[in-house]
Image (tube, rainbow, N blue to C red):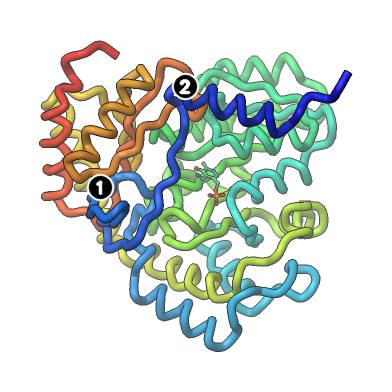
Amino acid sequence: MPRPDLLGRLAVQTAERAQAQLHRRLRTITKTDGPWLESDGRRLLAFCNNDYLGLAQDPRLVAALKQAADADGVGSGSAHLICGHRREHAMLEEALAEWTGRERALLFSTGYMANLGVMQALLQRGELCVQDKLNHACLLDGAQLAGATLKRYPHAEVDAAIRQLQRNAEGCALLATDGVFSMDGDIAPLRELSSLCANEGATLMVDDAHGLGVLGESGAGSVSESGLHERDVPVLMATLGKALGCSGAFVAGSAALIDGLTQFARTYVYTTALPPALAAAALRAVAIARDESWRRDKLGQLIRRFRRGAAELGLPLMPSRTAIQPLLLGDAQRALDAARALEAQGLLVVAIRPPTVPQGQARLRVTLSATHEETHVDRLLEALASLRLMDAPV
Ligand code: PMP
């Protein structure tokens, strides 16, 4: 029997996805200016990026990046442990540890790699990893890569998480959750999860990619906002590519955790370090995110304005108080049609469909940023009203 053709099979899967209207389109952006972007020759007002504090184009970050690139060049040249760890990396790690109230922090090139690395370094084959069903894909992939026994509990249901831990009471256990859920925008029940972990002897890991910079005093994130510390959440991960407007990620925790990850996290050891200039820009971003609380205040006002307006229109809001404000439309085609209709009116809002979200839970994922103005939110609400989304059932 001839072997099946791998590329042929992939082509069939791609065609099937297109047929099911689940194909994702890659858009080329030719220009950005605050919340505006230019694509296919059209200027669009975007409500889809994760630049929550509006730092991605801040001239102070650009200047820090340029200055460091002038001094150090572009690429780091190697992995950290070979010859890649520069002063900029060390300074950024210190600033991130201090901000999040942890002993130390360790940089990773992306959030995806940070989560893979942590799981693989902490968990041995067959050990228990309990996760919220709506955790980001890289937490799930990390547990699988580690060969852990992955048990997923229904979204935010602490009782179900307790049952998973009690049913598997032997051996080490890691409970991992998003701090802010990336497609729903709600916040994990962190206090309950942390007492659960304390009672059951499990270690709690929080991925705060969407909470850092946005929540908590001086933006230290969802864990800090919940009044929790390193002893409650020993493994804290967050990214530099969202509210901090850069790219990359870090894990913060005890010196012992960071020493261990430095030795054993393969996605740290075997990959090129972040460009030092990017670390310099992120260092500037941390200072701005901490100090300029007006950005969080403005974002909060925009979120409240959007939710008030959407509720008045009877739009299917979800229970979120963060910058991620999805409108649950249910059917994938309906979400796609809505996104297309908004784009025709000059607004870019992304339709999120399965497999990114569960079947029947397609949505428009509206994200707000401190670069938006009230008039932008009003324009989005007017456009949404014109789609009459409230008339059809979810
Ligand atoms: N965790 C969460 C919750 C995320 O939303 C994302 C990115 N969308 C990641 C991790 C991955 O981070 P990065 O984009 O830096 O790989």
In the image, is the residue at mark 1 within 8 Å of ligand 1 by its beta carbon?
A: no
Q: Is residue 142 left or right of residue 38?
A: right
| Residue bearing mark 2 | 19
Residue 286, compared with residue 129, is above or below; it is: below
Question: Does dot 2 land on a helix, a strand or a loop?
Answer: helix
Point 69% across, 21% down: residue = 165
Question: Does dot 1 land on a helix, a strand or a loop?
Answer: helix
| Residue bearing mark 1 | 300
Rendering quarter of residue 168: top right
Q: What residue type is disc 2 on?
A: Gln
Residue 201, compared with residue 284, is above or below; it is: above
Point 62% across, 54% down: residue = 251
Residue 117, compared with residue 127, is above or below; it is: below
Quadrant holding the N terminus? top right
Q: What residue type is disc 1 on?
A: Gly
Judged from this view, the residue extending furthest toward the front is 2
Q: Nearer the viewer, residue 132 or 19?
A: 19
Judged from this view, the residue extending furthest toward the right is 1
Q: How many marks?
A: 2
Q: Position of residue 80 (x, y in %)?
A: 73, 68
Point 63% across, 74% down: residue = 75
From this viewpoint, is residue 275 visible?
yes
Q: Position of residue 12 (x, y in %)?
A: 61, 25
Q: Nearer the viewer, residue 252 or 232?
A: 252
Q: Nearer the viewer, mark 1 or mark 2?
A: 2
Q: Position of residue 364 (x, y in %)?
A: 32, 31
In the image, is the residue at mark 2 within 8 Å of ligand 1 by its beta carbon?
A: no
From this viewpoint, is residue 216 visible?
no
Q: CA distance from mark 1 to mark 2?
A: 40 Å
Residue 199, compared with residue 287, is above or below; it is: above
Q: Is residue 195 left or right of residue 393?
A: right
Judged from this view, the residue extending furthest toward the bottom is 71
